[in-house]
């Protein structure tokens, strides 16, 4: 007996593409670098500015976008004798992007660096082993790209002739 497979993804399905929607939010260089730096322990505007070397206007706009989109939250702090200021912390939504950021870093190390190694690597605090981005199924099993299938979750459109039958 043949197993029935769900329908393949049609070109029309890509009009609702989640990758395109995600890139519209985080696909700009400074945005992804801000997220990288937040996960590296940078939280204050001036520290982002020093590390990123972008304009204050660009940084301010990107922090506002990330905050409004729910990827960063503002946290108040005040140095003695100074006015109240805000730092930025990752939200759960940002943490869920971490495998993507790690994957970008590892791809860049492997394909953009002549020796295949970047300036830093990620290691587990528990056992010291290197951490890598991976494809894992819902039962936590590793999945090879050749074992993946893109399956449409959209209902096929019903044409007027189909409806009248």
Image: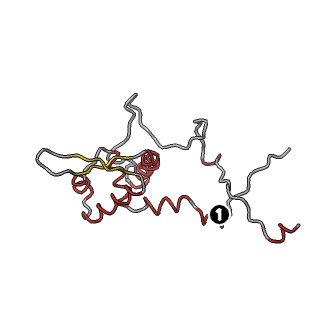
What residue is shown at x 59% (from left), y 63% (from top)? 16
Q: Position of residue 118 (x, y in %)?
A: 35, 48
> What is the tally of numbered marks visible in this picture?
1
Q: Residue furthest bottom?
A: 160
Q: Can you give x and y, in whole percent of width and height, for residue 23 in the image?
A: 47, 61
Q: Relative to 30, does residue 146 appear above or below in the rendering?
A: above
Which residue occupies the foreground of this view, 112 or 93?
93
Residue that extends furthest to the right in the rendered view of this protein: 165
The answer to whether residue 162 is left or right of residue 79 is right
Q: Residue at x 37, y 53 (%)?
A: 114
Crowd band around label 1 with a 10 angstrom C-alpha radius: few (<14), some (14–19), many (20+): some
Task: State the residue at coordinates (66%, 67%).
Answer: 12
Q: Please tell me which residue is depicted at 26% across the width and 62% down the height of the picture.
A: 54
Q: To which residue does mark 1 refer?
A: 13
55 relative to 73, above or below: below
Q: The N terminus lies in which quarter of the figure?
A: top right
Q: Position of residue 112 (x, y in %)?
A: 40, 55
Residue at the left extreme, as displayed = 81
Rendering quarter of residue 34: bottom left
């Amino acid at each position: 007996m043949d197993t029935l497979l769900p329908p393949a993804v049609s070109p029309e399905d890509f009009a609702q593409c989640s990758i395109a929607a995600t890139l519209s939010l985080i696909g700009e260089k400074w945005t992804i670098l801000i997220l990288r730096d937040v996960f590296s322990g940078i939280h204050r505007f001036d520290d982002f500015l020093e590390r990123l070397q972008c304009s204050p206007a660009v940084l301010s706009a990107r922090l506002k976008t990330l905050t409004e989109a729910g990827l960063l939250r503002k946290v108040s702090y005040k140095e003695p004798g100074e006015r109240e200021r805000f730092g930025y912390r990752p939200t759960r939504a940002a943490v869920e992007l971490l495998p993507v950021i790690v994957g970008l870093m590892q791809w860049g190390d492997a394909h953009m660096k002549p020796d295949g190694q970047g300036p830093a690597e990620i290691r587990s605090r528990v056992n010291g082993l290197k951490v890598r981005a991976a494809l894992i199924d819902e039962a936590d099993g590793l999945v090879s790209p050749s074992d993946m299938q893109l399956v449409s979750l959209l209902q096929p459109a019903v044409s007027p002739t189909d409806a009248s039958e």
